[in-house]
Amino acid sequence: MKRNSLFLLSIVYCLLSLQFCTTDPLRMCDRVFLKQPIPKLTRIAFGSCADQDLDQSILNEVVKKQPQLFVYLGDNIYGDSYNIHELEARYGKLSCKKEFQNLITHTNVIATWDDHDYGHNDSGDDYAPKEESKQVFLKFFGEENNDARQSHKGVYTSYTYGDSSNLVQIILLDLRTFRTPLIGSFENGYSPNYDSAASMMGAEQWNWLRNELLKPAKLRIIASSSRFDTEADGGESWGNFPEEQARMFQLIRTTQANGVLFLTGDIHFGELCKRKENNLYPIYDCTASPLARHANEPWFNQYQIATSPVGYNFGTLDIDWEQTDPQLSFHIFNLDGNETMNHSFHLSEIHF
Ligand SMILES: [Fe+2]
């Protein structure tokens, strides 16, 4: 090869290398999140498990329901890597989806994470690059300057909407950063861990949650990536940590926090559970999953009161503040935007 050709080739190589090294996957497509004030929260939507390599058109159906807020409940992408650049690239791919752009420009969006976007399948506190992953997550959702989230480990945080007559508190838990390793395996199933040192949330997050539950609110929506109500069934859920699950019930009792319900994801089917424990009002747990990933046939648990058919889905929670005893309605919708499940109740049902 002639010297001139070699020189030109080396220039091209250098330029390509420079571009590769300096391209920030999170800058490939702008994310301008809607920041619309919500004076009174009457409809939120929620969902989980969205594979960035698959069609996200269900997000267009979310937008059509005109929620004031969308809560990403985790597995928002399938990163599944110890390499932060790979994780960033997969977030970047979601950024460029027009359906995602439609969502974030028409609906306020808040988020927590689960295993696949945090690190890899079923990972917990043993995932080493958790801090780097957190910074990518915060940057992706435009939360890198959120002082509350930057002031502690993990991504847990809370938001409030409305005034004292209709105040809604949304608590986003982090069930990955502090979670002790599971007993068992994905292939053979997990077993409950009764060790008092085992934790879903870690001591600091528990203390924070206690303070949150002591704050005033009419309705408290706890966004938990893992299903809350169910007992251990071999998959991931709070049931794998019965002591932690009992601690949550006890925390609600001791703080006398009214209006607590759970929104959950992760499991690739939609369901509604309702669990009654002694000296506590019923705890609702509405699961919406998947937005865009394989869908499972629902499996039974003793607290289940409804399921949605196999398929992509998202949920909404409507709050009718105009009634003397405000009415709450869970809905699950499919890929066509058709309702597949609903359940209504009054706020007084989830009061001491
Ligand atoms: Fe998950």
Image: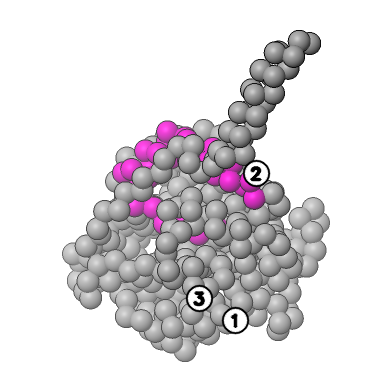
The local crowd at label 1, few if under 14, some if 14 to 19, many if 20 or more residues have their Cα within 10 Å, is few
Q: State left or right for residue 44 relative to residue 182.
A: left
| Callout 2: SS | helix
Residue 58 placed where, x, y %?
44, 38
The local crowd at label 2, few if under 14, some if 14 to 19, many if 20 or more residues have their Cα within 10 Å, is some
| Mark 3, residue position | 276
How much space separates mark 3 and mark 2, taking CA atoms? 43 Å
Pointer 2 residue Cβ closer than 8 Å to ligand 1: no
Mark 3 or 2, closer to the camera: 2
Residue 74 placed where, x, y %?
54, 55
| Mark 2, residue position | 86
Which disc number belongs to residue 203?
A: 1
- Res 242 → quadrant: bottom right
Q: Which comes before the other along the chain, label 3 or label 2?
A: 2
- Res 21 → quadrant: top right
Q: What's drawn in magenta, residue-wise?
A: 84-113
Q: State left or right for residue 170 relative to residue 164.
A: right
Q: Furthest residue to the bottom?
A: 254
Residue 334 placed where, x, y %?
45, 41
Q: Residue at x 47, y 68 (%)?
A: 149
In the image, what residue type sits under mark 1?
Ala
Residue 284 lies in the magenta stretch: no
Pointer 1 residue Cβ closer than 8 Å to ligand 1: no
In the image, what residue type sits under mark 3?
Lys
